[in-house]
Image: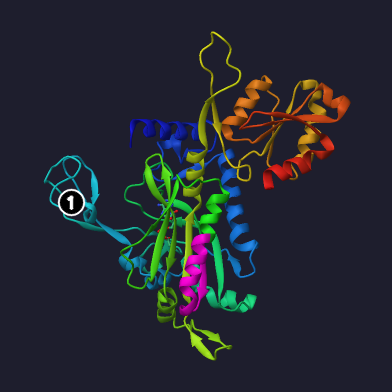
Amino acid sequence: MSEKNLELMDKIVSLCKRRGFIFQSSEIYGGINGFWDYGPYGVQMKKAIEKLWWNYMVESRTNVEGLDSTIICHPKVWKASGHLDQFGDLMCDCRGCKARHRVDQMEDPSVCPNCGSKDLTEPREFNLMMKTFVGPVFDEDHTAYLRAETCQPIFVDFNLVRVATRQKLPFGIAQIGKAFRNEINPRNFTFRSREFTQMEMEFFCTDEDAMQWYEYWRDQRLKFYEMLGFSNDVIRTYDHEKLAHYAKAAMDIEFKFPFGWGELEGIHHRGTWDMSQHQEFSGEDMHYVDHDNKRKVLPVVIETSVGADRSMLALLCNAYDEDTAETKKEGQEEDVRIVMRLPAIIAPVQAAILPLSKKLNENAEKLFGDMARYFRCEYDVTGSIGKRYRRQDEIGTPFCVTFDFESLEDNCVTVRERDSMSQERVGIDQLRMYLDKKING
Ligand code: GAP
């Protein structure tokens, strides 16, 4: 990572802590590597991302259903999926510098790539599944696993969802939820965590139609990132050359993080692998009866899989900006404004309601109550208006609404826009419509 990008990443991490977006989990105990807590603004933003994804992928479509499954499933689920036997890396430790390496990523597996020492431990298999016990006895018979991906319960519940909803192929099932992986090297802030949220959609179709659906979902997902304001400079696609033995196609949508290009989302053509594995291990018939063509088919799966935490990190990185603000006076040092240029739809606070004077609190509080029914709002009375604008810029609030003494006379408020810093007088009775148009388009 270049010096400049390292500095940028540090600024983002420190802003996230200072302003209550993301904190290290259990910080007072020294933290726990790979676990992150979302603070007051962080939780608002993460929920907004999930809501947007859910609306785009589920609510606005007739052919995608939702699911909210448990984190702990029958352990056989993970046997069938291959996670218990294959979901791991061969690792070795350097006795010299204590670094841990993935053997398949070492150019020369007999030499530590960090310090050059040849004093390495024997390679050991590390499984990434997180283990727990269900029931009062902590032994192998009571072992269970925290799910490593949210899609497996979707495959397991396929028949139940299909019958309950009377859906016919092709259709999808989507889920948002926690996933857990014992990542060997959690790193790059929340990018590689041990506990994270996935947003996955599994689309079930016939083999003949599968490639068409693969392309359709790739385009839909790219459109989603365009909607979030990601330009082509920071988004690219990468087609996998090496495919899993059951897969027909796979690609990543990558984002240009300050630490380099990284996977944001995977789009996978998984063939009939998932359905045939669960059919074999559970004994349940996973075939779909295609009455129109008088045949039975094992559904092929097209998957779109994205992390909510990674999406949020990408949005934060894309939004961070510094500019020299309008308040700079001659002879003064340059006044740097930190501004998060977040899309209004996912900003943690969409409108800040600011009374110009404490004497106006009662009226401004009423306005806050009215607006908070429709938008994520914050009420801020402390400090000068300039300081309050700065605080809102730093958390990405797109609109600041100032209630002043004139508002008592003309029933209007001043709306200040974050990016242009332009100000406009808007009638209080028009404010909801005005903000709705700007925020929700
Ligand atoms: N069901 C397919 C699957 O889980 P994956 O590529 O392992 O595929 C999908 O994960 C997405 O989940 C990634 O593109 C990323 O956004 C997110 N993700 C995976 N591992 C992660 C981790 N350790 N920390 C944060 N997000 C992660």
Kind of residue at disc 1 = Glu
Q: Is residue 211 above or below residue 379?
A: below
Q: Nearer the viewer, residue 52 or 321?
A: 321
**Residue 303 image position (x, y, % from top left):** 47, 66
**Closer to us: 362 or 342:** 342
Q: Quadrant of residue 393?
A: top right
Q: In this view of the protein, can residue 256 be seen by the observer?
A: yes
Residue most extreme to the front: 232
Q: Quadrant of ligand 1?
A: bottom left
Q: Residue at x 83, y 23 (%)?
A: 406
Label 1 sits on residue: 107
Label 1 SS? loop
* The magenta stretch spans residue 329: no
**Measuring 48% from the left and 82% from the top, which residue is drawn there?**
284
Instruction: Name the dominant secondary structure of the magenta segment.
Output: helix
Label count reads: 1
Give the colour scheme shown. rainbow
Q: What range of the chain is rendered magenta?
A: 200-219
Q: Magenta stretch containing residue 213, yes or no?
A: yes
Where is residue 181? Give x, y as percent: 39, 55
Residue 187: x, y in percent?
36, 44
**Is 162 on the left or on the right of 253, as rendered?**
right
Q: Residues within 10 Å of mark 1 (few under 14, many from 20)?
A: few
